[in-house]
């Protein structure tokens, strides 16, 4: 699903750039485009050189910025960065922070993308942009100088400094802090919520194309983005009102939900004044942003959010001639409950029986609804082995565990599993699957309606589970 329609309303890239026109106007970019069989112009999004040229071309065309991005350094996606800046603009307007804007950009990168964009859009803004990578520092300074922005942007070498930003705040006041921290923990193979498939069929992180040009400092930090942002939070408690607004852009939904919970706890404990959050969208990618303040004058809870239309629920009309159970809401609800418990082994669900409908809230970290054909074949093999009077112990010794072996463990074991699942539910902030399922009537028909909930890592698991129910409810 493309998210361009959910970009910030003022983002000029809600309408995709016309590559053919760009190629005609900019010869360097023309070297990276190709035509399909219908004559339409494209670029290869797996080619870092093409992405680098695209970013440089758009900066030049739309913002009159001449920027150089070195090889082996991260190529920033322009529309997503612009989303973040436009949201900060909204926050400042909401808080009536309109004059003498001074900001800190943490980890500015080789082209100092945030300060360059922000000061071009808002000439009165001033930035201190920190960086620790020597090559990025060199290019960031050159890019600022080449665009005559030295009087608005200062590039600061943060190398060999233990703190992230608090050393900059001594006897100085700033309007906001912003950052797009490194995603990964200790390797480039750290798992992501969004998973893509390479041409060779191997699973890999959704962002493998962009990340393969990033330096270690740009992509990796101890503990990943969660630990890095927690350090920013810790320092914010030391600087407090010396900075009006603290903001971060987040790459992982799990990180976002955990940090959001932390900020809610701080509000309840009255250690924080208020906070805000939003979603940032571009293409097939979604990011999240948080902002918090220690100043009671700024009520961020009521601040503008980038509004996203709620996705349509999945609807399936059941066959009145179904054979698996009676065609009534109660029977269908009991049948689905049995499938969840005994076939899918999902114990983290709630079932609410109402007057004219049954509602489920389902959470799972295992995709047991997949590979159903293989499981059916194994079950048939198991049954055929039983008819041949093969000893069960011999069967287990072959390495194939009977599918319903857990049934012999007794109710005590099931109760133990359920207790463990509840404990897991308390600490898990994201799930492979988190969805609602409603069984209700639509006139004379009975329908199943399913929707992906906030704690789900993506929507595909909901689609897969619905397909599983379609196959079973026949």
Image (cartoon, grey):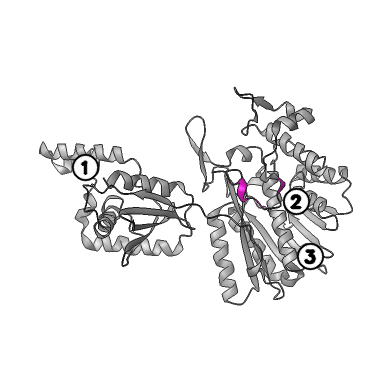
Left or right, residue 385 beside residue 423: left
Residue at which label 1 appears: 396
Pick the front one: 75 or 283: 283
- Residue 114: image tag: 2
* Residue 370: % across, % down: 35, 43
Magenta stretch, residue numbers: 1-12
- Earlier-in-chain disc, 3 versus 1: 3
* Residue 144: % across, % down: 84, 46
- Whole-angstrom CA distance, mark 2 to mark 1, is 60 Å
Crowd band around label 1 with a 10 angstrom C-alpha radius: few (<14), some (14–19), many (20+): few
Residue at which label 3 appears: 174
Depth-wise, is mark 3 or mark 1 nearer the camera?
3
Circles 2 and 3, Cβ within 8 Å, touching? The answer is: no
* Residue 331: % across, % down: 24, 57
When asked about the image quadrant of residue 230, the answer is: bottom right
Instruction: Please state, as top left, top right, bottom left or bottom right, where the C terminus lies in the image.
Output: top left
Q: Identify which residue is drawn at 84% across, 53% down.
A: 153
- Residue 372: image tag: none
Question: Would residue 164 be visible to someone looking at this image?
Answer: no
- Whole-angstrom CA distance, mark 3 to mark 1, is 67 Å
- Earlier-in-chain disc, 2 versus 3: 2
- Magenta residues: mostly which secondary structure? loop
Q: Secondary structure at mark 2?
A: helix
Crowd band around label 3 with a 10 angstrom C-alpha radius: few (<14), some (14–19), many (20+): many
Pick the front one: 299 or 291: 299
Q: Identify which residue is drawn at 82% across, 67% down.
A: 172
Residue 403 against residue 456 in the figure, above or below: above
Question: Would residue 335 be visible to someone looking at this image?
Answer: yes
Q: Secondary structure at mark 1?
A: helix
- Earlier-in-chain disc, 2 versus 1: 2
């Amino acid at each position: 699903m493309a998210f361009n329609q959910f970009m910030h309303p003022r983002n000029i890239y809600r309408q995709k750039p016309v590559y053919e026109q760009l190629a005609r106007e900019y010869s360097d970019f023309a070297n990276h485009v190709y035509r399909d069989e219908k004559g339409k112009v494209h670029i290869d999004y797996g080619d870092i050189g093409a992405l680098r040229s695209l970013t440089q071309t758009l900066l030049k065309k739309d913002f009159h910025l001449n920027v150089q991005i070195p090889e082996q350094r991260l190529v920033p996606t322009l529309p997503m960065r612009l989303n973040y800046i436009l949201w900060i603009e909204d926050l400042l307007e909401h808080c009536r922070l309109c004059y003498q804007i001074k900001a800190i950009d943490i980890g500015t990168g080789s082209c100092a993308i945030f300060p360059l964009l922000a000061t071009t859009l808002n000439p009165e803004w001033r930035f201190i942009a920190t960086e620790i990578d020597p090559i990025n520092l060199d290019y960031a300074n050159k890019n600022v100088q080449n665009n005559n922005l030295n009087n608005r942007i200062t590039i600061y070498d943060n190398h060999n400094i233990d703190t992230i930003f608090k050393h900059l705040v001594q006897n100085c006041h700033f309007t906001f802090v912003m950052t797009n921290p490194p995603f990964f923990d200790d390797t480039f193979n750290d798992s992501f919520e969004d998973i893509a498939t390479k041409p060779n069929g191997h699973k890999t992180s959704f962002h493998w194309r962009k990340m393969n040009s990033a330096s270690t400092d740009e992509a990796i930090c101890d503990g990943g983005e969660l630990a890095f942002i927690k350090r920013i939070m810790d320092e914010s408690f030391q600087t407090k009102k010396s900075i009006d607004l603290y903001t971060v852009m987040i790459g992982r939904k799990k990180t976002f939900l955990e940090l959001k919970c932390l900020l809610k706890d701080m509000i309840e404990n009255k250690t924080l004044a208020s906070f805000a959050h939003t979603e940032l969208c571009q293409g097939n990618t979604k990011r999240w942003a948080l902002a918090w303040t220690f100043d009671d004058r700024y009520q961020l809870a009521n601040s503008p959010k980038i509004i996203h239309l709620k996705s349509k629920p999945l609807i399936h009309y059941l066959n009145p001639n179904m054979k698996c159970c009676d065609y009534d809401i109660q029977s269908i609800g009991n049948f689905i409950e049995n499938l969840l418990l005994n076939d899918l082994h999902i114990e983290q669900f709630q079932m609410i029986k109402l007057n004219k409908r049954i509602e489920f809230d389902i959470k799972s970290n295992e995709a047991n609804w997949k590979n159903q054909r293989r499981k059916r074949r194994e079950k048939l093999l198991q049954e055929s082995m039983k008819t041949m009077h093969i000893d069960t112990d011999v069967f287990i010794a072959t390495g194939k565990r009977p599918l319903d072996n857990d049934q012999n463990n007794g109710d005590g074991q099931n109760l133990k599993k359920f207790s463990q699942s509840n404990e897991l539910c308390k600490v898990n902030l994201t799930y492979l699957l988190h969805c609602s399922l409603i069984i209700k009537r639509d006139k004379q028909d009975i329908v199943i309606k399913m929707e992906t909930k906030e704690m789900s890592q993506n929507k595909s698991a909901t689609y897969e589970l619905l397909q599983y129910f379609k196959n079973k409810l026949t």
